[in-house]
Structures are given as structure tokens and as C-alpha cells.
Amino acid sequence: MIDHCIKMYNHAQRQEIYRIYVSDTLRIITENTAKFVGGGYIKKRYIEIVEPHKNKQDNRSAQEIIDDVVNKSGIKVVK
């Protein structure tokens, strides 16, 4: 059963990688064509549209992250 789950996960990952590769390739082709003829094109990558949270940079300090985790989890810090 676990082997089947692992195989399904690996298959899904390969499919996602292929989708990202194909969509990036097509985006670059359309971007180059659009620039040549003066047209528009989609500027976002497929992965940025489907999973926008993956590419977000967290600019908070370490202490801000710690405080956020502590507040959201309800942990009481004893000093």
C-alpha cells in the first residue's frame, strides 16, 4: 500500500515538473514572438499562478517569525 502511494506521489511530481517545463517554454516562445511583433504576453509563470505562496520571500526577522508561531500556536513562553 505504501509503495503504491509513493509511486503515485512520484508520478504526480513528474507530471507537475513537466507542466512547469512546458508552460515555461511556451511562455518564453510567446514572449519572444510578442516582443518581435509588438504584442503582449503573460508575464507570470505557471507555478506563480497555480501556487503563489511557493515563491513568496519572507522578509520578517527571526524574532518576528518566532513571535508569530508562538502567538498562533498558543504557546506560553516561560523565562
Image: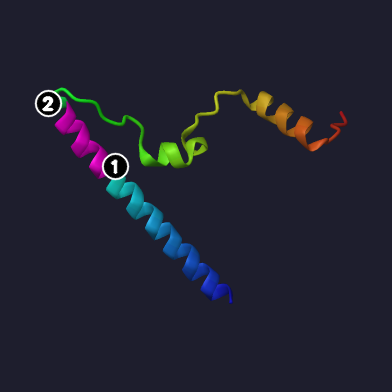
41 on left or right of 4: left
Which residues, given as a range, are shown in magenta?
A: 25-34
Task: Residue 32: give x, y in percent of width and height.
Answer: 17, 32
1 over 77 or under it: above or below: below
Q: Earlier in the sequence, mark 1 or mark 2?
A: 1
Direction from residue 27 to residue 12 in the image, left or right: right
Provide the residue designation for mark 1: 24
Q: Is residue 26 magenta?
A: yes
Q: Is residue 60 left or right of residue 54?
A: right
Q: Amino acid at mark 1?
A: Asp
Whole-angstrom CA distance, mark 1 to mark 2, is 20 Å
Q: Is residue 19 above or below residue 67?
A: below
Where residue 37 is drawn, which disc sits there? 2
Is disc 2 placed on a helix, strand or loop?
helix
Q: Quadrant of the C terminus?
A: top right
The location of residue 47, given as percent across then percent down, is: 41, 41
